Image: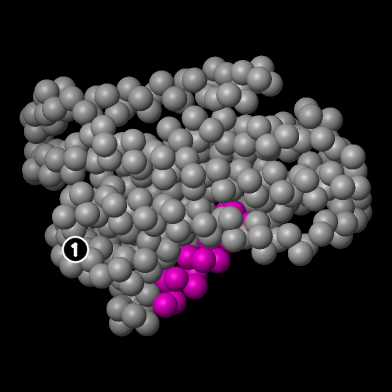
Amino acid sequence: MFRKYKKKILFSIAFGALVFLGFSIYADFDKLINTFGEFNWYYFPLIISLTYLNFTIRFFKWEYYLRILKIELKRKASFLIFMSTFVMSVTPGKMGELLKSYLLREENGTPVSRSAPIIIAERLTDFISVVLLCITGAFVFNYGQAIVIGVGIFFVICVTLISSRKISLSIITYLEKVSFLSKIAHKFEEAYESIYKLVRIKPLVIATILSLVAWFCECLGLFIILKVYSTFTHIEVSLLSAVFIYGFSTIVGSIAMLPGGLGVTEASMTGLLVLLKIPKDVSVASTFIIRVATLWFSVAVGVVSVYFYQRYSHRELESIGVSQAET
């Protein structure tokens, strides 16, 4: 499984370099380098810490979901598995997050069909929380309302459908009649029983609140970057603006289904900053600083976690295959 995504991760890194090159040309490379140099890098550890706080809060959400499904796992193994998944942050649509289910299968034999719904529930609550974070800004700045509301409605409908056993079981019954799906129909049923438990009102509210706090931390990281630049560029950016820009760009990047939202997220974030009359070089620099502190930092955390997980479990991730995990 891990081997399958290795080339995609390397491709994403190369693509990220091309994105940086393109935006450097847009902002004037020499001017951009000077702008990076003017940033007070003493604030960077704080921004990194906010990103890691995001990861930590989401880890508690992962643990909460494990408890709901009564999946027993040692805290250390759980933490390393969760953090290892960040090495897959630059896989298309974050499909690499299924690594969590594969590693969980290796640890305690939990079937992928039982644990994979946790990943679905994580994404549902992440999207809902980001929509909640930026919906006010969408109306205040009169920008992106259709996308924010559309995404919000889509995920509310998803939660509503999943919450209806009658509708969901009827869909599963229909799938059982499809010849090439009939052999794995029982896995659909097992997966549904898991996701159903995760989207009931209480766990949905708790998980969404955790996600709200987690993603606000990264929004705050962008705000700090802009405030640092405001000390000598005289730009004015409110916390509401930073939350909206980061949240909206995250939504757009996720919809694009590109590895890590590369290119689309940066374009959206830079474009919105420029709309606020922030100079192009400061807009691009701010965008890349926050992306390094979030996306690329997450990949680095994943790489380190994979190393420590392999030492802890005495397993090589490249030896874990999809067929093994699904048995």
- Tell me if I can see residue 23 in this picture: no
Q: Residue at x 19, y 40 (%)?
A: 197
Residue 279 appears at what percent x and percent y?
A: 86, 38
Q: Is residue 267 magenta?
A: no
The image position of residue 230, as x and y in percent, is 84, 44
Amino acid identity at mark 1 = Glu
> For this rendering, which residue is in front, 315 or 213?
213
Instruction: Name the residue beneath numbered marker 1.
Output: 72
Question: The C terminus appears in which quarter of the rendering?
Answer: bottom left
Q: Is 202 situated left or right of 34 in this image? A: left
Q: Quadrant of the N terminus?
A: bottom left
Q: Which residues are magenta?
A: 292-308
Q: Work out whether residue 313 or residue 242 is closer to the camera in this orientation and state it.
A: 242
From the viewer's side, name the closer residue of 1 and 212.
212
Residue plotted at (44% across, 48% down): 94
Q: Decide whether the magenta segment is chiefly helix, strand or loop.
A: helix
Where residue 101 sits in the image (x, y, percent)? Answer: 27, 57
Q: Is residue 290 left or right of residue 62?
A: right
Residue 173, located in which quarter of the rendered image?
Answer: top left
Residue 87, above or below 230: below
Mark 1 burial class by Cα count in 10 Å: few <14, some 14-19, many 20+? some
Foreground pick, 254 / 133: 133
Asked if the stretch drawn in magenta spans residue 303, the answer is: yes
Image location of residue 291, percent across then percent down = 64, 51
State which quadrant residue 284 falls in: top right
